[in-house]
Image: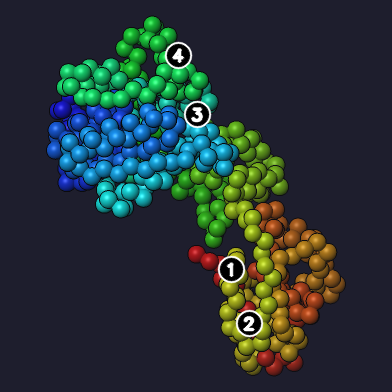
Amino acid sequence: MFEEFKNFIDRRQLFHPDDKILLAVSGGLDSMVMAYLFHHCKYRFAIAHCNFQLRGEASVLDEEFVGQVAEKYHVEFVSRRFETEKYAREQGISVQMAARELRYEWFEQLLVKLECRYLATAHHLNDAFETALFNLVKGTGLSGLRGITAKSQYRIRPLLFSDRKRIESFAVEQGVKWREDQSNASVKYHRNFIRHKVVSLLEQINPDLINSFSESARKITAAENIVAAKTGEFKEKLVKTDGKDFYLDKKVLAEQQEGSFMLFQVLKPFGFNFSQACDIYDKLGHTGKRFLSKDYQLNVDRQALIVSPVSDNPVKEIFIEAGQQTVLGQQFRLSLQQVSAEGFSIPNNKDTAALDFEKLKFPLKVRLWKKGDWFIPLGMKHKKKLSDFMIDEKIPLNLKLRVSVLQSSGDIVWVIGYRIDDRYKITSHSRQVFVVKKQMYD
C-alpha cells in the first residue's frame, strides 16, 4: 500500500513532497492509517484533533491517544475541545452540521498558524460511494454523483485510492492501532444507515461494488470536465456584463441544444436551481416575468434575461452641497462640475446631465424613485409620471428598482442615466452649467 499511496499522491498531484500537510486525525481506523502512511513515507505533516465532547470519557481518551501517536511520530500536535451541542442549539442546526462547521473553521486557522499547505482528511472509496448515494437520494447533478474528489481547494483525500476493507487489512498487517467510535454503529444517522443497511444489500448484486463505483466516478468526472468546458464556451457567447448586472442573450439561449440544462449551468453560481432554470427557459417569451434566488433576481426582458444582485440594504438619500465635486453612492459615483455656458457643447450621453446652474437650489438630493414621482422630460411641455416614463423607456423590472433621481427643492431635475427635466435645461440665457456625470463602480 505504501507505493500505491505515493503513486496516488503523485498522479493526482495532491501536494509537493516538500509541502507540509495538516492531517485531521480522529483516532479511528482511517485517519490512523493515513497518519501511519505519512510517517513511513517521510512526508512533512502536523496532526490536528477535534474533541467534540459528545461521547464523555471516550472523547477524552481519543484525544490522549492521538496525542501519544503524534509524540511517537515526533510531529506537531494540536487539539481543541468544542461545545458542539451548545453551538448546534444556538445556530439551529444538527449536531453533525455543527461539528462540520466548527472543525473546518478551526482547520482553516491552523493551516495559516502551522504554515501547512493542505488539509488531509482520511476519506476513502467507501466514503465517496456513500456520499454519491446520499446525494442521489436527495437529488443531485454530475458533481454529486461522482462523490468526493481527491483534491478540492485546500483539502486533499490521499486515501481515495483504497476501500475500507483494504485499509483495515493493512492496519492489522502493520500493527496500526486505532480506537472505535461506537456511534459509527448507530443507524440513526443517514450516512450510517446507508453504510450498514443499503451498501450491504447492493453488494449482494455486485460484490465488487466499490471498485465499480470508482470506475464510474472517473467517467462522471470526465463528463463533468467536458460539461464545464462547454459551459465556459457557451457563457462567452451568452453573457454580457454591465456593472453588477448580467445580460443573457435570449436568441443565443434559444438556439442552444439542451438549453434548460445549459442555462442551469450558467445560473448555478447565482443560486438558481435546476427546477428554476427549466421554468425560466420555458418562460423565455414571457417578458416581465421575475425569478428570485437568495442573492439575485432574474427578469425576463425582451432580448435578454437580466440577472441582478438583490440588496437587503436600503439605498440612503445623499445630499449635495454647492461646490462639492464628487458624490459616492451605493450603486454609482457622481462627478460634479460647474462650468461657463459660453461655448459649452451639450454631451450626447445619457450618463451626463447638463443643468442650468442658476435654477438649482442647494443642497440637491439623490434618492431612489418612488411611486407618485413625476417630472417634465426634456423636449416635453407636460409632466409625466416616472412610472409611465420607465415603461416608455422599456426599463426592465429589476433595473427599475434601482432607478435614482437628482432632486432640487422638491423637483426631479434628472432621472439619473435617462433624462433631465425640461425646466432645468440650459438655454441661450444660461450663464453657468452644472455638469453631473454618472460612473458605475467596477
On screen, residue 296 above or below 34 = below
The spot of residue 114 in percent (x, y) is: 27, 50
The spot of residue 67 in percent (x, y) is: 26, 37
**Residue at horizontal 75%, vertical 85%?**
361
Q: Hey, which residue is sitting farthest right in the picture? A: 382
* Sequence-wise first label, 4 or 1: 4
Q: Which mark is residue 332?
A: 1
**Residue at horizontal 57%, vertical 42%?**
90
Q: Which mark is residue 140?
A: 3
Circle 4 Cα neighbour tier, 10 Å, few/some/many (<14 / 14–19 / ≥20)? some
Q: Is residue 79 left or right of residue 434?
A: left
Q: Which mark is residue 165?
A: none
**Residue at horizontal 30%, vertical 53%?**
113
CA–CA distance in space, label 4 to label 1: 56 Å
Q: Secondary structure at mark 2?
A: strand
Q: Is residue 104 left or right of residue 435?
A: left
Q: Is residue 239 visible?
A: yes
Circle 1 Cα neighbour tier, 10 Å, few/some/many (<14 / 14–19 / ≥20)? few
Q: Secondary structure at mark 4?
A: helix
Circle 2 Cα neighbour tier, 10 Å, few/some/many (<14 / 14–19 / ≥20)? some
On screen, residue 315 above or below 336 = above
Q: Which mark is residue 435?
A: 2
* Sequence-wise first label, 1 or 2: 1
